[in-house]
Amino acid sequence: PRSWATIKIAANKTTTLDTMTLINGDINEDKAITVKDYNILLNCFGEKQYTEACIYAPVSNRVGADITDDGVVDGLDYNLFLREFSTQTSQ
């Protein structure tokens, strides 16, 4: 899971942050894009994002299954997920 921190940024000063890796499409935040993420996306697709089946619904502090962060889980999210999934390499 993500951990959040507040960082104060001042004018005319350099602020150094820890290195982080962002994986677009990693809905459940397990550091990989897998079939689990795909199933989560399908359970939140369209009107399903407003049902109990959608455990990663977009809310104010996280995008959940809304990969494009536009407020809806739709074809744009699905296509972006498929593109990111297709670029994964076996580890």
Image: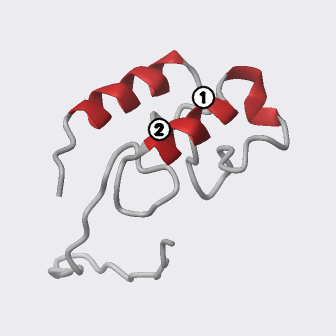
**Comes first in the chain, label 2 or label 1:** 2
**Residue that carries the numbered disc 2 in the rendered image:** 67
| Crowding at mark 2 (Cα within 10 Å: few <14, some 14-19, many 20+) | many
* Residue type at tag 1: Val
| Percent position of residue 24, x then y | 34, 45
Query: Tags 2 and 1 in contact by the CB under 8 Å rule?
Result: no
**What separation in Å lies between label 2 and label 1 (alpha carbons)?**
8 Å
Q: Residue at x 62, y 33 (%)?
A: 71
5 over 59 or under it: above or below: below
Q: Determine which of the numbered discs, if any, sits on residue 58 in the image.
A: none
| Percent position of residue 43, x then y | 68, 34
Q: Secondary structure at mark 2?
A: loop
Q: Determine which of the numbered discs, if any, sits on residue 73 in the image.
A: 1
Find residue 44 and report its image quarter: top right
Number of callouts in the render? 2
Give the left or right position of residue 48, taking residue 74 as reference.
right
Q: Nearer the viewer, residue 25 or 34?
A: 34
* Residue type at tag 2: Ile
